């Protein structure tokens, strides 16, 4: 059964996930380092794992084939994809077996450039267009997984 895992501590699209999950009656597990407010819905569960990397480790250990993980953390995305899952970043980029390797390479390159002082800053801020792209991608992904499992 399809489950959506949210790497929640810095996730800007939690509300969007809740809306889509409600429409499709899909279970959502919100994973964070500290307690967060979540909807009072039997399909939404909060899992708190304290400590550096503990939330990521938990998601990677339970997300599997047919599951969707929402995260901007590319190494976590790679771990989830390796177990057969699909990952969507908050800006709507799909990370799967065909795309996660490139995403890891770009992440590593940008990290090296930031450390050398060649490039500064981080990702661009979220826009309305990003949220719209995310919603569309999540909807498409849920439907594709459902078709594949029917």
Image (spheres, rainbow, N blue to C red):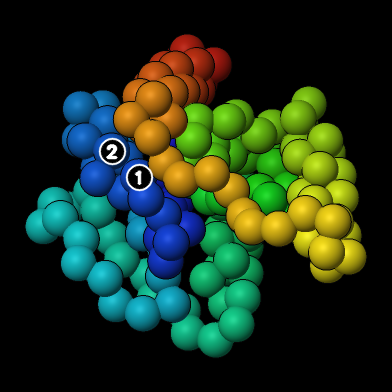
Q: From this viewpoint, which residue is outermost toward the bottom? A: 51
Location of residue 41 in the rendering, given as x and y in whole percent from the top left corner: 14, 52
User: SS for tag 2?
Assistant: helix
Q: Badge 2: few (under 14), some or many (20 or more) residues near its Cα, within 10 Å?
A: some
Q: Which mark is residue 73?
A: none
Count of numbered labels shown in the rendering: 2
Q: Is residue 76 visible?
A: no
Q: Are marks 1 and 2 in contact (CB under 8 Å)?
A: yes
Location of residue 135 in the rendering, given as x and y in whole percent from the top left corner: 36, 27
Disc 1 and disc 2: Cα gap in Å? 5 Å
Location of residue 91 in the rendering, given as x and y in whole percent from the top left corner: 49, 35
Location of residue 73 in the rendering, given as x and y in whole percent from the top left corner: 62, 55
Q: Nearer the viewer, residue 39 or 106?
A: 106
Q: Is residue 112 visible?
A: yes
Mark 1 highlights which residue?
A: 13
- Relative placement, left or right, of 139 versus 96 is left
Q: Residue at x 87, y 50 (%)?
A: 109
- Relative placement, left or right, of 139 versus 37 is right
**Residue 27, quarter of picture:** top left
Q: Is residue 80 above or below residue 56?
A: above
**Residue 81, quarter of picture:** top right
Mark 2 highlights which residue?
A: 16
């Amino acid at each position: 059964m399809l489950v959506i895992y949210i790497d929640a501590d810095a996730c800007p699209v939690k509300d969007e996930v809740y809306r889509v999950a409600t429409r499709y009656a899909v279970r959502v597990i919100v994973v964070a380092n500290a307690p967060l407010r979540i909807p009072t819905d039997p399909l939404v569960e909060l899992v708190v794992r304290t400590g550096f990397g503990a939330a990521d480790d938990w998601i990677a250990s339970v997300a599997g084939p047919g599951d969707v993980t929402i995260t901007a953390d590319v190494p976590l995305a790679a771990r989830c994809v390796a177990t057969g899952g699909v990952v969507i970043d908050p800006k709507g980029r799909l990370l799967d077996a065909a795309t996660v390797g490139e995403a890891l390479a770009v992440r590593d390159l940008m990290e090296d450039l930031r450390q050398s002082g060649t490039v500064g800053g981080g990702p661009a801020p979220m826009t309305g267009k990003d949220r719209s792209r995310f919603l569309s991608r999540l909807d498409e992904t849920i439907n594709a997984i459902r078709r594949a499992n029917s």
